[in-house]
Image: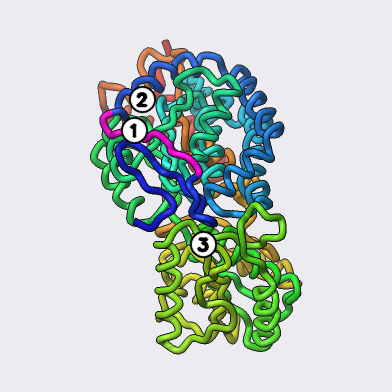
Amino acid sequence: MTNTNNQSAGVIRAMNPATLELIREVPAMSAKDVLGVVEKAREAQKKWASIGISGRLRYFQKLNDQIIANIDSIAETITIDNGKTLVESVNSEIYPALDMLRFCEREARSALRSEKLSHPLFGVLGIRSSVLYEPLGVVAIIAPWNFPFAIPVTQILMALIVGNTVVFKPAALTAVVGELIRDLFENAGFPEGVLNVIQGSGGVIGEAIMDSGVNRVAFTGSVPVGKHLMKRAGETLTPITLELGGKDPFIVLEDADLERASSGAVWGAFVNAGQVCASVERVYVHRKIAGKFTDLVVAKTRQLRLGDGRNFSTDMGPVISESQILTVEEHINDAVGKGAKVLAGGKRWDGLPGYFFEPTVLVDVDHSMSCMVEETFGPTMPIMTYSDIDEAVEMANDSRFALTASVWSRNEKRAEDICRRIVTGCATVNDCEYTYGFAVCPWGGPKESGIGRTHSTHGLCEFANIKNICVTSPRFTNNLWWHPYSETAYKRMKSMAGAFYGKGVINKFSSATEAAKTVVCK
């Protein structure tokens, strides 16, 4: 079995995808262990919720200190387990976690504070109404291997700050980072049972989690697995958040700064070896500037240095596994077979024994090719031309995914208007792929990119039970809509409809007068 991880006899053999060297063996759980872990989390939840946001933030501060003090070792662990460079381990993994800690410290109290509601009828009827944000209970977080630190840690923090406890399933391909997360939370002093890490086979453990009675599931991963989990969640009506991927368009207008746009395209396509749900996987460039843009992209792509991510001279590390390389090769071969040309890369790189593939630029592509419609999740950049912006927007929207999009132009207002026409969850102008790093920005998208949002106050609400409480201080013998019904009751409700919802002062006053005649006070 050629992969970065092998699991047998209760052990995950974690291997460095750049060198294929064994990192360590990680103990794995079986499906029958999951229920006990969930029960442990449920026992810890009430006490965790009872200490309030201020109490929980004290642990968050300790975790923040742990991360800051151990950035070097955290980055190295992520790099040897996942393959990305040390720079990417810091800026795309550690930074988002730290920013989420900051967000929770600054925003959680106000975002989760109870709200008083107002309505004209409340005063008449003696009603006080409020909204409370309460924890759900136990939240399961099933994380991917491409961002094995940032994605689970940010989601764990959002679930915990609301007052939930968490059952966390790391990807088997990055089990060592899962252990790292466990250690960081333990060293920060989080109470036992608040964060519970379950290592093991994704399919087996995932099924057990869906049967365990958790109060919410947050899954990040592939569309097929997400669809399966959604069906399973439907059996028990378990709420589920799904972040499933993207095929993100990159639109270059004829007035774009081509130096910046070409650099953005190269970074956006090849960061983390293209294994990013927000990766630049489709480039649409105006015909008038396509030649110059493509020349710049090809030149900059050829300058990228492949290698072990622990070397500071490395620009791009390996992909995670042999199966990922096979997908990349399949998409390239399909495109070339249908008339596309490879201008850079296009083959495996043998400078190290790991799973390396050259960053690849393709032209003469169209939407009949897999590389333009299916998520490649590897180091490819297909470039397609367009004649007018309506055509570009139509092509951008011609996808079953809708996670992110970017538009590049010196006319920022025009670019922003174009962003509004693209069906997507996130859109950027003159930049790409970075918004996940800012916890204030909601993350997620429609279509097959998923359901729900992570990050931001919207993401916090995903992990909360939103409860409405209404208190009545009675002013009448009966509520106006109670029994017994009568013609008078009908006229009263009709008059009140005009008084409260009709238009015009005279009409409102007339309706209110008629309603008052039918109301009998205590």
Counting other residues with Cα less than 10 Å from the Cα at mark 1, is it few (<14), some (14-19), or many (20 or more)?
Answer: some
| Amino acid at the residue labelled 3 | Pro
Q: Is residue 521 magenta?
A: no
- 280 vs 6, nearest the viewer: 6
Image spot of residue 245 (x, y percent): 46, 57
The label nearer to you, 3 versus 2, is 3
Residue under label 1: 29
Question: Residue shown at 42%/51% (left/top)?
Answer: 221
Question: Residue shown at 37%/56% (left/top)?
Answer: 223
Image spot of residue 247 (x, y percent): 49, 65
User: Tag 3 or tag 1, which sits nearer the N-term?
Assistant: 1
| Amino acid at the residue labelled 2 | Val
The stretch in magenta equals 23-32
- 234 vs 149, nearest the viewer: 149
User: Tag 1 or tag 2, which sits nearer the N-term?
Assistant: 1
Label number found at residue 37:
2
Q: Tags 2 and 1 in contact by the CB under 8 Å rule?
A: yes
Residue under label 3: 353
Image spot of residue 379 (x, y percent): 54, 68
Question: Residue shown at 43%/62% (left/top)?
Answer: 324
Question: Residue shown at 35%/44% (left/top)?
Answer: 7
Q: CA distance from mark 2 to mark 1?
A: 10 Å
User: Tag 2 or tag 3, which sits nearer the N-term?
Assistant: 2
Question: Which quadrant of the figure contains the C terminus?
Answer: top left
The label nearer to you, 2 versus 1, is 1
In this rendering, the answer to whether 235 lies above or below 60 is below
